[in-house]
Amino acid sequence: MSNLRGGLIGCGYFARNHLHAWQETSGASIVALCDLDASRAQGYAEEFGIEAVYSDADEMLRDESLDFVDIITHPDSHRPLVELAARHRVHVICQKPLAPSLEDARAMVAACRAAGVTFMVHENFRWRAPMRAAKEAAGGLGKLFFGRIYWRTAFEVYSRQPYLAEDPRFIIYDVGVHLLDLARFFMGEVEQLYCQIQRVNPKLKGEDVATIVLKMASGATCLVELSYASKLEEELFPQVLVELEAADGSVSLGPDFRLAVVTRDGVTCRTAGPHIFPWASAPNEATQESVVRIQQHWVECLREGREPETSGDDNLRTIELVFGAYESAETGVPYQVTATRCGSCAKEPRP
Ligand code: NAD
Ligand code: 89V
C-alpha cells in the first residue's frame, strides 16, 4: 500500500514534534507544509526535506493531492481550517483544545461527518506510555471509586509558548483539557463537575490554578488538579501524576514514571517511562513519544476504516468539561454535563 499523503498546517513550536513523529510513523508522509508566515514553513521544509511550501491552506488543498491534513494552529483558527479540509473532502487531525466554544466544536464535527471525512483531535496525553501502563494495571482491580489526576508545577512555560500568558482562559483550556480527557480515559464519562480557579501570578491574563471535582457517571469521584504556581521540592513538568483506587487495589503513577500497583497479593513497583527517541528533548520525552503513538493510531484507523479513539465526536465530551469548568468557577455552582453530540450525529445522546 502506498503511503498516505499529508499536509501540515501551522509550522510553529509544537509542529516540530509532529514532523519528527511523522518520520517515525509508518504508512504516511508529510508532503506539504503551510504557515501564514511562509518563512516558518520554509524553515521546516529545509529541516525535514519537504518540497512543497504554502502560506495559504486553501491553495495547498487545491494544488496538492492529499489524503489528510494535520492542523497545529491555535484554537481560534481550528474551525475555519477544519471546515476547509472537509470542503476538500480530506481527512483531518486537529490539535487541542478543539475550539474556543462548544458551538464551534459541534459545527466542526458536523462538517466532517457531512463530508464523510475522518476527524481526530490530537489529544495525545492519553497516548503517553505511563498513562497506558496505569490504565492496564487498573484493569484488573475491580470497580474504580476514586481518582486523582494532577499537574502541579512552577515551570516557566511562557518563553516557549508566549500566547499562554495572554489568554484570559489559561490552565483549564490549555492543560486541563488533557487531564479532563485522562479522567474520561481512566474512569468513563462525567455526570457533574464543580470547579474553583485562582490567578496566583498577576502577570498572567488567565487562571494558573484550578481544582475540579468530577462526579463520574459510575458513581466514582475524580479530582483534577492544575497548577502553574506550585514551587515544590521536585519540579516535574510536564509529568502528570495519577492515583486510582478500586475495590481490589490501587494504582499510583508517581514522579519519574514510578508505577506502584497494590493488589490482594501485595505491591509491585516498576518504571513505566516512555521510549526516548534520538530527537527527543528533556523534559518532553513522554509527550514526544505520545505524538508518535497517536499519529500511528491515526494511520491505522484510516487504513482500517476505524474511528480514532479521540475522534471529534469523542472529544466533544472532553471539551464540554473544559467549558463546564469555567462556568462552574464563574457561577460557583456545579455544572451538569449534557449529552454532547454533534447536530448530525447518528448516535443517540447519552441519557
Ligand atoms: P505557535 O504559535 O508556535 O504556532 C502556530 C503557527 O500556526 C504559527 O506559525 C502561525 O503562523 C500558524 N498559523 C496560524 N493560523 C494559520 C492558518 N490559518 N494557516 C496556516 N498557518 C497558521 O503555536 P504552538 O505552540 O505550536 O501551538 C499550536 C497548537 O498546538 C495549539 O492549539 C496548542 O494548544 C497545541 N499544543 C499542543 C501540545 C500537546 O502536547 N498536544 C503542546 C503544545 C501546543
Ligand atoms: O501539552 C500542551 O498542550 C502544552 C503544555 C504542556 C505547555 O501545556 O501546551
Image: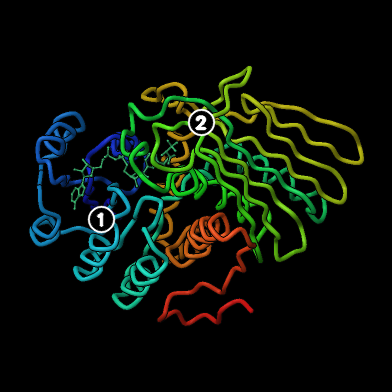
Mark 2 within 8 Å of ligand 2, using the beta carbon: yes
Q: Secondary structure at mark 1?
A: helix
The x, y position of residue 43, in whole percent, is 14, 31
- Image quarter (top left, top right, bottom left or bottom right) of the N terminus: bottom left
Q: Amino acid at mark 1?
A: Ser
The residue that mark 1 highlights is 77
Tell me the tag on residue 238. 2
The x, y position of residue 125, in whole percent, is 51, 43
| Front residue (pair 76, 218) | 76
Q: Of the residues under marks 1 and 2, which one precedes in the sequence?
A: 1
| Front residue (pair 74, 266) | 74
Q: Is residue 265 left or right of residue 32?
A: right
- Image quarter (top left, top right, bottom left or bottom right) of the C terminus: bottom right
Q: Is residue 118 left or right of residue 283?
A: left
Q: Is residue 109 left or right of residue 132?
A: left
Q: Residue furthest top?
A: 233
Q: Residue at x 42, y 64 (%)?
A: 312
